Amino acid sequence: MDFETKLDRLAEVAVKTGLGLRPGQELVMTAPLDSLPLARLITRHAYKAGASLVTTFYGDDQATLARFELGAAESFDTAPAWLFEGMAKAYGAGAARLAISGEDPALLAGQDADKVSRANRARSKAYQPALQHIVDFHINWSIVSFASAAWARMVFPDATESDAVMKLWDAIFAASRVDQADPVAAWAAHNARLHDRKTFLNEKRFSALRFRGPGTDLTVGLADDHEWAGGSEKARNGITCNPNIPTEEVFTTPHARRVDGFVRSTKPLSYQGTLIEDIAVRFEGGRIVEARARTGEAVLQKVLETDAGASRLGEVALVPHSSPISQSGILFYNTLYDENAACHIALGQAYNKCIIDFENKSEEQLVEAGANRSLIHIDWMIGSGEIDIDGVSASGETEAVMRAGEWAI
Amino acid sequence: MDFETKLDRLAEVAVKTGLGLRPGQELVMTAPLDSLPLARLITRHAYKAGASLVTTFYGDDQATLARFELGAAESFDTAPAWLFEGMAKAYGAGAARLAISGEDPALLAGQDADKVSRANRARSKAYQPALQHIVDFHINWSIVSFASAAWARMVFPDATESDAVMKLWDAIFAASRVDQADPVAAWAAHNARLHDRKTFLNEKRFSALRFRGPGTDLTVGLADDHEWAGGSEKARNGITCNPNIPTEEVFTTPHARRVDGFVRSTKPLSYQGTLIEDIAVRFEGGRIVEARARTGEAVLQKVLETDAGASRLGEVALVPHSSPISQSGILFYNTLYDENAACHIALGQAYNKCIIDFENKSEEQLVEAGANRSLIHIDWMIGSGEIDIDGVSASGETEAVMRAGEWAI
Ligand SMILES: [Zn+2]
Ligand SMILES: [Zn+2]
Ligand SMILES: [Zn+2]
Ligand SMILES: [Zn+2]
């Protein structure tokens, strides 16, 4: 199968499996300029699927760098709130949302850290009205990746740039199942398997998960009324979508005040251009009370100080060590991929939708149930072929969930 | 001077002369994807001038064509109202606005006319909230052009594509005065000359203009309290901008109910991919009662039926036959250029700002004064080296304004 065919199939998977786009639906897309060929194919598949209108916002790394090079220092708290309010209005009126990701992971690595953090903070804040429609699944949405040269160079530093880009595309195509005979059918089968796992875990109603392995003995309490998610999701508009292409995880909301023990990261974390390696932290009562890292420790400490919720967990996710992305052996420096290579936890904001009946609960009730609150949500990997996981019931009985990194259920 | 230098100077003229961008101002830009090099240079000059944030919306002709090829017929009344409302919010909060134009003039030439007109109508309607800030000069704004391959091929059909693009760039650079020693100073001098003309005409307070030449004897009544405009404009936010780069015209609002006689077009009108040539119309009491054209007559008739104001005038503009754009002898198939090559009139919407003290007049008062209302505003050329124009006073006395296409004042 040639490159063009696979790229076209990725676009088709994005529209059909990722979004489940409905005839008559508007589509709002964000895409880096370099992803233009993929964005155009997605546009075509969206119109074929009956989109009433596709509106794409192209982002330009050069424009971002020009701002850091030439912009006035006092301007970095400015963000386009009016645009995100407009997007929120579109989502409120039923538009679907697709993001193409794959930008240079180190784009801002050499820039002034204060400007970077102010710009990110302003943008995160301004983005809230639009983001709320997405994280609460008011609408069908999805993220797919493209292989930018900058990202490919980072993943395959020893290959020539064109080889690196093709290797990365091959990894994206494989992980997105577009090299299989019928990609949309392959996704349906994969979703069915993920749904079986999440149904099993939801019926068990564990009180906590206990992770054990080299340098790790961590008990992660699960939120009251937690609900496991994974694979396709039915959005509140009634449309079933796959929010991440690819995805291998089942995940839920931990209890922000019931996490204890110590844990080590099993893969490097790439955070805003900094590589944070060999993280080792200790939790008491849900909070990280001790944190070290072999590289990037200063950045990690700064992250933990973002706000009160930054040193507590907002997600716990299970991924078998045999997952295709894990087996590829590639470190992607990209959460969408690396979080699907291993069991992981996330610092910061919890997903409301991983609490049963969240739409009818108040903010106070959600926080009381254990949902963490923060401006950040940063996944890092704690799974490997050496990790055992037990489910712990409310009465303290344990049951094997994973053994040596594989499902035991 | 090499190409890169001239392109950079065009970007500088756009920011300094076109927008007069102020430190701390946000900039909202719209640009075709093919104009990326110019858009990036404008972004750099905007940040150098102190822009707090530059947000660019790239338009993609391929996406537009995909919609016409694949989109559902019932979807063509959809427009991104949420986006234009967002832009209106940005302008309301003080953002400046720059448009880069130069798209393929014949992009939609082969498409279903009903879909084209429905899509345009929906877009025009949705765009109103944003457009109002622009046409009423609440903010500083400007339009500049770039030489797309499609446009260049149309203007120079006998040249190779790369030659055609370079010839068109040279024409753009010359008309935009960036090949002069100090482009920003050259614009200041040009603005001073245009201001002298408009001051003269404003002091005359003509009741009408009478155009005479081959196939033309047209009396265009001027709106009560009309005001002539041209060159740089002071926006209500206190910033002086040049809304069109280039510009050679002085113009005002005709009286929608006082236009009589007949008139012939002197250059082809390119409207949404159709060439309308040799237009000949007759006015009675402000309204076109008879319209013919050698080519594109069906499209012209359809335009006139858009709404009640589409067959009345919203603008009359004076441009000497010796203007540099006219002297270039090039037919640009682009209103920004061709309207600056000849005296012209426009069907449709009038500019409120060409009525004295418009901000303190009600919609009823503006319409009573003669300001036309329509969803369209289409300029077409009626000037040439053979046209004489007289100013007519309220008491019926006449005075030469132009003779054989040149200023007589
Ligand atoms: Zn996850
Ligand atoms: Zn996560
Ligand atoms: Zn004009
Ligand atoms: Zn006009």
Image (cartoon, coloured by chain):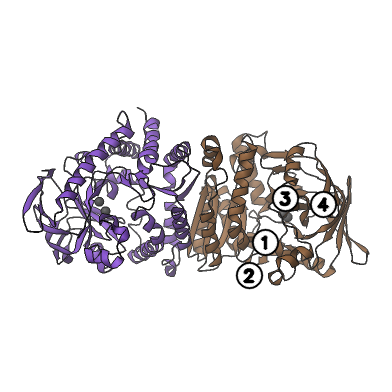
Chain colours: A brown, B purple
The answer to whether marks 4 and 3 sit on the same chain is: yes
**Badge 1 amino acid:** Trp
Assign a secondary structure to mark 3.
loop
Residue A120, above or below A394: above
Q: Where, quadrant-wise, is the C terminus of chain B in this rendering?
A: top left
**Badge 4 amino acid:** Arg
Judge left or right: residue B220 versus residue B116. Answer: left
Determine the image quadrant of residue B255: bottom left
Do tag 2 and tag 1 residues touch (Cβ < 8 Å)?
no
Q: Where is residue A132 in the image (x, y as percent from the top left)?
A: 62, 61
Residue at image mark 4? A287
User: Label 2: chain?
Assistant: A
Residue at image mark 2? A236
Distance between the alpha carbons at the discs numbered 4 and 2? 33 Å
Q: Which of marks 3 and 2 is nearer the N terminus?
A: 2
Residue at image mark 1? A187
Q: Position of residue A135 (x, y in %)?
A: 65, 61
Residue A307's label in the rendered image is 3
The residue mark sitting in front, 1 or 3, is: 3
Count residues near mark 2 (Cα–Cα under 10 Å), then give few for <14, some for 14-19, many for 20+. few
Do tag 1 and tag 4 residues touch (Cβ < 8 Å)?
no
The answer to whether marks 3 and 2 sit on the same chain is: yes
Q: Position of residue B327 (x, y in %)?
A: 19, 39
Residue A327, above or below B79: above
Assign a secondary structure to mark 2.
loop
Towards the viewer: B253 or B218: B253
